[in-house]
Image (tube, helix red, strand yellow):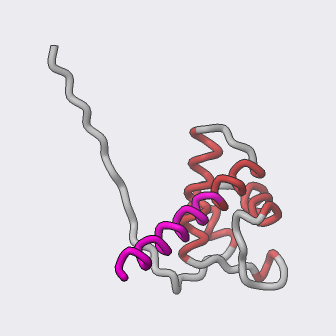
């Protein structure tokens, strides 16, 4: 029996200069304001602005929020686990960049 597997890949280029409000980020990531606030408290997201009404999120925050949403939904990871996972992924990317620089010498 021959079965085929087809997967649709959806992507979007996000400019780092983009700045979204809390409400806009919720719409883009399909998350509630409470979830976004909890991610800010855990350090998953770091908005600019003094208070929640003045929060703005850049393109990197959008990517992190989407990944956090995916971890929460698909793997049922809590906020602390999401923060840890994203911190570890950040560290991996830093080490890969450092290794790439070193290997060019």
Q: Which residues are magenta?
A: 88-105
Q: Residue furthest top?
A: 1
- Say left or right for 7 vs 20: left
| Residue 92 in picture, x, y percent from top left | 55, 62
Q: From the image, give the main secondary structure of the stretch colored magenta.
A: helix
Q: Residue at 74% of width from left, 45% of height from top?
A: 78
Was residue 51 drawn as part of the magenta stretch in this picture?
A: no
Q: Across the whole image, how many numbered discs are drawn on residues?
A: 0
Q: Quadrant of residue 45?
A: bottom right
Residue at (25, 37) in percent of width and height:
6
Residue 68, above or below 78: below
Residue extending furthest toward the left: 2
Q: Position of residue 65 (x, y in %)?
A: 61, 61
Residue shown at 79%/60% (left/top)?
Answer: 42
Q: Is residue 91 magenta?
A: yes
Which of the image's four quarters has the C terminus?
bottom left
- Which residue occupies 16% across, 13% down? 1
Q: Residue furthest front?
A: 105
Viewer-nearest residue: 28 or 79: 79
Q: Nearer the viewer, residue 26 or 63?
A: 63
* Of residues 92 and 66, the one drawn nearer to the viewer in this rendering: 92
The location of residue 2, given as percent across then percent down, is 15, 19
Q: Quadrant of residue 83?
A: bottom right
User: Is 32 in front, or is 63?
Assistant: 63
Q: Is residue 32 above or below residue 16?
A: above
Q: Is residue 7 above or below residue 23?
A: above
């Amino acid at each position: 029996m021959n079965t085929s597997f087809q997967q649709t890949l959806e992507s979007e280029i996000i400019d780092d200069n983009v700045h979204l409000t809390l409400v806009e980020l919720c719409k883009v990531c399909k998350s509630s304001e409470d979830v976004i606030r909890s991610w800010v408290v855990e350090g998953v997201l770091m908005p600019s602005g003094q208070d929640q009404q003045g929060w703005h999120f850049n393109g990197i925050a959008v990517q992190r929020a989407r990944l956090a949403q995916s971890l929460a939904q698909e793997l049922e990871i809590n906020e602390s686990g999401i923060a840890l996972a994203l911190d570890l992924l950040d560290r991996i990317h830093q080490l890969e960049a450092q290794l790439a620089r070193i290997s060019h010498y």
